[in-house]
Image (tube, rainbow, N blue to C red):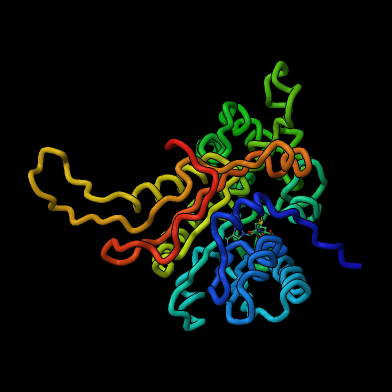
Amino acid sequence: MKAAYRHVPVLLGEVLDLLDPRGGEVYVDGTLGGAGHATAIAERLGPEGLVVGIDRDPTALEAAASALEAAAPEVPRVLCQGSFAELDEILVGRALPGADLFLFDLGVSSPQLDVADRGFSYHREAPLDMRMDPGERTLTAAEVVNTYNEADLARILGAYGGERHARRIAAAIVAARAKRAIGTTTELARIVADAYPARERGGRHPARKTFQALRIEVNGELDALSKGLEAAVRWLLPGGRIAVISYHSLEDRIVKRLFGELSKGCICPPELPVCVCGHVPVVDVLTSRPVTPAPEEVEANPRARSAKLRVARKREPGGASPRHPVPPGPSGSAE
Ligand SMILES: C[S@@+](CC[C@H](N)C(=O)[O-])C[C@H]1O[C@@H](n2cnc3c(N)ncnc32)[C@H](O)[C@@H]1O
């Protein structure tokens, strides 16, 4: 029997407040998952609206199709399997003039973590896979740990996992695989735990950061994010809103930097008497600080713990006022 797809949407109320979906709008969900956010948004779009849902994972798309049909059968929808890094190809193929709303709720879904054979979890014995699109002949976590050289492994663990003991762990992986290829999640988790200094083995699982780093490498997550966001801002119609929920600082930094750059006017050095750069702001950032979940949400759904939401709105060409006023929402001083 097929397991039910259960994923609780993170920061749902805040996303609805800030994205402010309206009847007849075109909504592109770049990380559809089980359509937790998408169903709530679809209910506000009505039959004149359109949901374009994208996910790399065919299991998610299947679950999302049923959820959307149950919650908002009257709202037209197009679901596409693919990466949001290929947003241009996906949207051009749909002959859309543009989109009013974009959401990227990054990372993995609860079912991806919970289904053991996907290999995302260090708690569950499984082949080291970690691909979000498991059908494709693409890089797996097993290939990374068994073929990357020690320096590359250390670089990935440090850069994508923020792992302080990256070099020790990389050396331990290389020593272990010299005896026998590393094949499973629990085997790798044990190698990492043994490489950790004994005094630091108490708190969260020592393999947590290593697994995050491998997942980012296997799925090319950071490159995809930069490409997808840049394309999404191009596709946004004037007055359109884009929301991004990230779960670690590398992702949040990319979102913050891009929104920051796109919201800037002239970037000429101050000593120049006139502007020569011609730079004009393309978006207004609606969340000067990232929005984070309330303690009650984290208690009810611990996977929301590290979530950060940033939202921006596309300006009218030439800088005229946007179609919608700034929705009231949590914001504060710049961060
Ligand atoms: C946190 S879940 C989204 C959950 C969804 N918002 C909901 O409420 O059900 C993230 C989803 O994004 C998908 N994903 C991650 N990176 C992707 C990419 N580059 N392109 C398309 N989908 C991606 C994953 O497969 C996963 O289903």
Quadrant containing ligand 1 reads bottom right
Viewer can see residue 262: yes
Q: Quadrant of the N terminus?
A: bottom right
| Residue 304 percent across, percent down from the top left | 69, 44
Q: Is residue 20 left or right of residue 205?
A: left
**Residue 149 falls in image quadrant:** top right
Placement of 22 over or under 115, stated as above or below: below
Picture mark count: 0
**Residue 112 falls in image quadrant:** bottom right
Looking at the image, the residue that sits furthest to the right is 1
Q: Quadrant of the C terminus?
A: top left
Residue nearer the viewer, 235 or 265: 265
Placement of 155 over or under 61, stated as above or below: above
Q: Residue at x 72, y 72 (%)?
A: 68
Q: Residue at x 46, y 42 (%)?
A: 253
Looking at the image, the residue that sits furthest to the top is 199
Residue nearer the viewer, 145 or 273: 273
Placement of 94 over or under 213, stated as above or below: below
Placement of 172 over or under 313, stated as above or below: above
| Residue 273 percent across, percent down from the top left | 7, 44
Looking at the image, the residue that sits furthest to the left is 273
Q: Residue at x 76, y 52 (%)?
A: 127
Residue nearer the viewer, 135 or 240: 240
| Residue 133 percent across, percent down from the top left | 65, 64
Q: Is residue 142 left or right of residue 300?
A: left
| Residue 75 percent across, percent down from the top left | 66, 79
Q: Is residue 204 left or right of residue 147?
A: right
Viewer can see residue 118: no
Q: Residue at x 74, y 67 (%)?
A: 59
